[in-house]
Amino acid sequence: MNATPTPQIHAPLQLEIVKEYDPNIIRFLVTGLRDLPVDFVETGKTLFIHPDLYPNGLPPPVRGVHNICRLNMQTGQTGRMSVTLLSMLRPYSADLYRRLSHAATFEELLACSQALVLIQCMLVLNEDGNACPYSEAISVMLAGIAGKLWQQAPIQLPQTLSPRCAWLLAESVRRTIIVCFMLRSAYSLNTRNYSVRTPFIDSLPFDLRTNLWDEHSETAWQNALSDTEGSMVSLNEWSDGLAAGRVHDVSCFSGLILAACKGQAVSSTASPPVNSYIDS
């Protein structure tokens, strides 16, 4: 999703490519995604949910899942989910999915999607592997959430939004879609030691300026804003650059993308010689 009108992809290609990764990479990916609910409780922010996107307070689906994430932290210090919480998460996930399917606005669709992703991070990546064996239905649901977000994303954002808020909305949609596919991959890798990918995820737009996500004010964001020319690439181009050691200032998000898309650790890549987003 871009802040300016762009063509939408309504029928993603279905070709799937089987991947197998090193167990250390799988553990890194699973741990990083499992920590997202914890990050949300501790900072009010995750790699795909930004609090400044909701200046009037978190929408009900996201606020509800924040409370569940807090409960998960309080009852799951050992990394294993309680039976009580597990029995709560499953019906709540089903309810969120029904609400997502009947969302009246795109804002409601995005909020339900983000809440569902956090629920699945807790539900399918819990350390008790017997609690949630691989389910094709969950994999299909995650891919469906991503596809629905992409298909229904507005091609033009409201002019009432500031440049930063418009960017945060577009970036939140892009990141939520990417995390859906990372979670789908991690879930499959963790339970059956292989995963599948489609051309849809490889062709997703990705903003090179990942540092903008962590600028805390409109002024700081504007000061950090670089020339937008050429700032958008495909996720495949970005992950290729990461794998080839052509990316500077690799963030936590970038590290998870490298693990999910290429099965590599950041420590295994070379350091670029100059300071830029990505060297050609």
Image (cartoon, grey):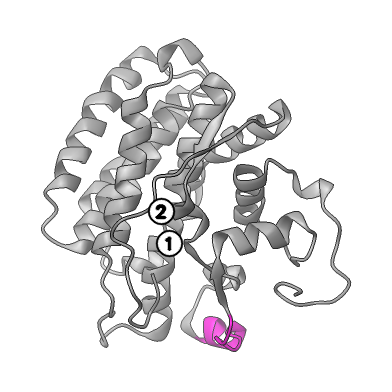
The residue positioned 52% from the left and 86% from the top of the image is 219
Which residues are the magenta region?
A: 219-230
Q: Position of residue 99 (x, y in %)?
A: 15, 44
Mark identifier at residue 119: none
Side of 241 where 111 appears, left or right: left
> To which quarter of the image does residue 273 belong?
bottom right
**Compared with residue 207, is residue 266 higher up or lower down, i.e. above or below?**
above
Side of 10 where 209 appears, left or right: right
Q: Nearer the viewer, residue 248 or 241?
A: 241
The residue positioned 39% from the left and 45% from the top of the image is 14
Which residue bears the numbered disc 2?
177
Label 2 element class: helix
Q: Amino acid at mark 2?
A: Ile
Q: Quadrant of the N terminus?
A: bottom left
Label 1 element class: helix
**Compared with residue 256, is residue 97 higher up or lower down, i.e. above or below?**
above
> Is residue 162 located in the magenta-colored stretch of the structure?
no
Q: Position of residue 187 (x, y in %)?
A: 49, 30
Mark identifier at residue 174: 1
Q: Position of residue 5 (x, y in %)?
A: 33, 81
Q: Position of residue 71 (x, y in %)?
A: 38, 31
